[in-house]
Image (cartoon, rainbow, N blue to C red):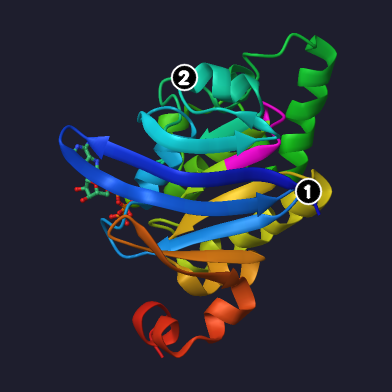
Amino acid sequence: MTKLLEVKGLTASYGQVRALHGIDFELEQGGITTLLGANGAGKTTTLRALCGVVRPGGQVLFDGKNIVGKGPEDVARLGVAQVPEGRGTFTRMTVEENLQLGAMTRSDRAGITRDIDKMYDHFPRLKQRRTQQAGTLSGGEQQMLAIARALMLRPKLMLLDEPSFGLAPLVVREMFEILSALNREEKVSMLVVEQNAAQALALADQAYLLETGTIVMSGPAKQIGADENVRRSYLGY
Ligand SMILES: Nc1ncnc2c1ncn2[C@@H]1O[C@H](COP(=O)(O)OP(=O)(O)OP(=O)(O)O)[C@@H](O)[C@H]1O
Ligand SMILES: [Mg+2]
């Protein structure tokens, strides 16, 4: 299998305070990797460093190209879409306008229209609400819109920061089913940061455990899920 993402010695700091102490991880082409860890472990910082929102150190090879030092727009153009913590839809715009904005870096009008229809197939609830202001959608609907908007970029890799945050258990399950279908059908690779360790481990093929800016455990998601300490600390049984 070829690697889509190879991260070596990734560091990131806020002012003088280092949040990532040189972490290594990788993601296979077409794969789903999950990054687990307690509050403040550095999960969001890792995603921000990858897409250039926080200035990283170390090496990040995406599709063979080093993207360290590139800004968010350049990273997006290369095919990395971000679904940030707290959703980040344009609240004053309609569902459909948000989807169109997601395709801002593209110029293939017909392809964009086709992809909007495709998003409505994946997310039928968004279709019913296409003219509704994003800010008036429910939390789950906004999360789905954020994912659909990221997909409008036609990304090779999607960075998802706690896609299940704040959602009711049934909606969480629906969300993970949609992510799995998108990975299968649209061939989008995913790096998923989650508090919901059980669901994330079921979705992913590889898992990494982050503690205060350092990777302390890594391996196939099944194996990590079976680990005694992980079960006790993150899965709660
Ligand atoms: N803008 C910032 N300025 C200063 N410190 C920050 C900033 N953002 C994050 N940090 C610090 O960096 C560390 C890692 O934070 P990060 O947000 O990456 O954690 P996280 O694993 O995503 O946590 P959570 O599960 O709570 O979202 C924390 O100690 C946090 O306080
Ligand atoms: Mg976070």
Q: Residue at (33%, 51%) from the top-left corner?
A: 42
Q: Amino acid at mark 1?
A: Thr
Q: Residue 85's x, y, as percent? A: 39, 43
Placement of the C terminus among the 4 image quadrants:
bottom left
Residue under circle 2? 71
Does the magenta stretch mainly form a helix, a strand or a loop?
A: loop
64 over 33 or under it: above or below: above
Q: Residue at (75%, 55%) from the top-left corner?
A: 181
Between the residue at mark 2 and the residue at mark 1, the CA separation in whole angstroms equals 25 Å
Q: Residue 132's x, y, as percent? A: 52, 28
User: In this image, 87 relative to 40: left or right?
Assistant: right
Q: Nearer the viewer, mark 2 or mark 1?
A: 1
Q: Residue 140's x, y, as percent? A: 49, 50
Q: Residue at (42%, 32%) from the top-left corner?
A: 88
Q: Is residue 154 magenta?
A: yes
Q: Amino acid at mark 2?
A: Gly
Q: Is residue 117 magenta?
A: no
Residue under circle 1? 2
